[in-house]
């Protein structure tokens, strides 16, 4: 155990600057993903748009996050291209934060959020991919820490925005009265915290589009822009440290000379994650066994469902809590989303240690079974407000490690030669967007109880797919072992004859 401690610590000391940079980049990702829900009503005032119009901003961000995740693999050919992409994307996020207060039309705001979403998607793919490439079999520990920083950023963003949110109507109409109370706005804000999915029964709230705008939310965005600025500075510092800038000494560092040459030769030869065309190389794809593609599909499907559960639960738990039979108070129900994200953050912090002690299959089995048990208990005790808080907390703890553990496990099975990171990140982004839309439509037609039912069904399917994944990976490894033995037997006669 102590030898493992020393090995992990020595690995971190060797790559500490790159590791901390990738972690900080994910803090930027979390900062950007969580600000829209709390500030959406003030942005509606700023753009003087209707509530239905402003929800297109959510779709714009989510859709282009998916596009960015798909495109992230295009920048993985070399360390230079990856770091340039991260530098550009983190700076774009700060720039978007700074210009959002200047977007006084819904179209301009949607374009700004589309640009931010695309930058977030690229960050998501590259940071995961580079960290897996850096640590390979030891990556689970560092991936858990990476995803902890998403939760940290997602917690900081609403805290920064909260002091600047309007307590009453932020567009004063000519016939404005005190009917637009702070509790009404708090209810709407909480309903829309999960990417603006819940839009039922909003006509009763008088939200004006014409009048005097009295919002102060601009200050929140400028503060977040400043908070995020050290992140592109950290990426730039890493580029200087790695001798990738024109102003830095181009000769490699003496201690890293051999590793640098090995890395460059590996990237030039197109092995591993180095080549941008490796995913689309037809000759190599034909040589792969069927299990190679099945593993990608199953891994992507599992994360499609589990990330979809996270998005759906965060989006609709408030709507479920304020609806019959719970009829929870608006302010109390508004805490559920924060409790959920806080438990995910704490869970990822806890799983950093657990990833060091236990294998990824064990952690995934524990997490997926835990998710099912919690959701079944939520279905049974559906009238208990106290258990909803307990269940929300435990659900966040259980589901928090699924993405990083699944990513590390899949890459390990495929020996870090596939396109697993790009496929899994894209699948997770797709699931978070699509499953939330599906659950929202079911809730609209069948009622709020269908929300828990949909999430429970999705968690059962994800466990079944994971069991199938374990079976396929067993076949894949046996096939790989047999092919390796055949290759060795063919090489021995050739060596003897020479």
Image (cartoon, rainbow, N blue to C red):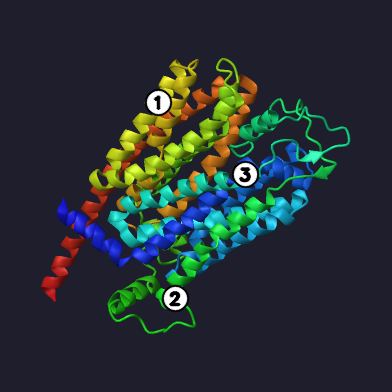
Position above or below: 348 against 248: above
Q: Quadrant of the C terminus?
A: bottom left
Q: Mark 3 points at which residue?
A: 163
Query: Separation of disc 2 and disc 3 at Cα?
Result: 38 Å
On the picture, is 401 further left or further right than 137?
right
Q: Which of the two residues, 336 or 169, is positioned nearer the viewer here? A: 169
Q: Which of the two residues, 302 or 62, is positioned nearer the viewer here? A: 62
**Residue 70 seen in the current view:** no
Q: What element carries label 2?
A: helix
Q: Mark 2 points at which residue?
A: 240
Q: Which of the two residues, 468 or 443, is positioned nearer the viewer here? A: 443
Q: Mark 1 points at which residue?
A: 374
Give whichever of discs 2 and 3 has the lower sequence position: 3
Circle 2 residues within 10 Å: few <14, some 14–19, many ≥20: some
On the picture, is 164 further left or further right than 279?
right
Give residue 58's position: percent from left, percent from top: 64, 44
Front position among marks 2 and 1: 2
Give residue 195's position: percent from left, percent from top: 61, 39
Give whichever of discs 1 and 3 has the lower sequence position: 3
Q: In which quarter of the image is residue 294?
A: top left
Position above or below: 118 against 361: below
Q: In the image, what residue occupies the spot 40% across and 57% down?
A: 286
Q: In the rendering, which numbered label is found on residue 254?
A: none
């Amino acid at each position: 155990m102590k030898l493992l401690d020393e090995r992990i610590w020595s690995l971190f000391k060797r790559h500490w600057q790159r590791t901390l940079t990738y972690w900080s980049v994910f803090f930027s990702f979390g900062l950007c993903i969580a600000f829209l829900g709390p500030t959406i009503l003030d942005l509606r005032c700023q753009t003087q748009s209707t509530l239905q119009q402003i929800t297109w901003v959510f779709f714009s961000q989510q859709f282009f996050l998916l596009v960015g995740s798909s495109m992230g693999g295009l920048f993985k050919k070399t360390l230079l291209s990856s770091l340039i992409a991260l530098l550009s994307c983190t700076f774009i996020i700060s720039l978007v934060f700074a210009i959002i207060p200047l977007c006084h039309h819904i179209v301009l705001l949607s374009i700004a959020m589309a640009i931010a979403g695309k930058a977030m998607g690229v960050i998501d793919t590259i940071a995961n991919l580079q960290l897996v490439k850096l640590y390979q079999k030891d990556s689970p520990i560092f991936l858990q820490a990476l995803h902890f920083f998403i939760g940290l950023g997602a917690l900081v963003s609403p805290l920064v925005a909260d002091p600047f949110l309007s307590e009453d109507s932020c567009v004063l109409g000519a016939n404005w009265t005190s009917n637009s109370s702070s509790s009404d706005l708090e209810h709407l804000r909480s309903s829309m915290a999960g990417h603006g999915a819940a839009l039922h029964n909003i006509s009763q709230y008088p939200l004006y589009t014409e009048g005097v705008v009295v919002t102060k939310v601009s200050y929140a965005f400028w503060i977040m822009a400043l908070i995020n600025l050290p992140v592109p500075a950290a990426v730039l510092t890493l580029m200087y440290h790695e001798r990738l800038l024109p102003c830095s000494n181009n000769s490699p560092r003496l201690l890293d000379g051999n590793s640098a040459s090995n890395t460059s030769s590996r990237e030039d030869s197109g092995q591993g994650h180095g080549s941008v065309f490796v995913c689309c190389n037809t000759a190599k794809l034909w040589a792969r066994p069927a299990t190679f593609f099945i593993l990608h599909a199953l891994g992507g499907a599992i994360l499609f469902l589990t990330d979809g559960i996270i998005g759906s639960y965060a989006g609709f738990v408030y709507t479920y809590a304020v609806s019959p039979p719970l009829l929870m108070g608006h302010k109390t129900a508004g805490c559920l989303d924060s409790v959920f994200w806080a438990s995910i953050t704490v869970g990822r912090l806890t799983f950093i240690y657990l990833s060091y002690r236990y294998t990824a299959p064990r952690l995934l089995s524990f997490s997926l079974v835990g998710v099912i048990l919690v959701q079944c208990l939520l279905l049974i005790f559906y009238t208990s407000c106290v258990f909803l808080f307990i269940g929300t907390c435990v659900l966040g703890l259980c589901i928090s490690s699924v993405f990083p553990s699944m990513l590390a496990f899949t890459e390990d099975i495929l020996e870090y030669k596939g396109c697993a990171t790009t496929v899994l990140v894209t699948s997770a982004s797709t699931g978070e967007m699509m499953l939330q839309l599906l659950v929202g439509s079911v809730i609209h037609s069948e009622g709020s109880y269908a929300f828990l039912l949909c999430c429970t069904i999705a968690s059962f399917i994800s466990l079944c797919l994971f069991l199938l994944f374990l079976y396929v990976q067993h076949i894949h490894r046996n096939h790989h072992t047999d092919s390796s033995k055949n290759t060795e037997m063919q090489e021995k006669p050739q060596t003897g004859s020479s």
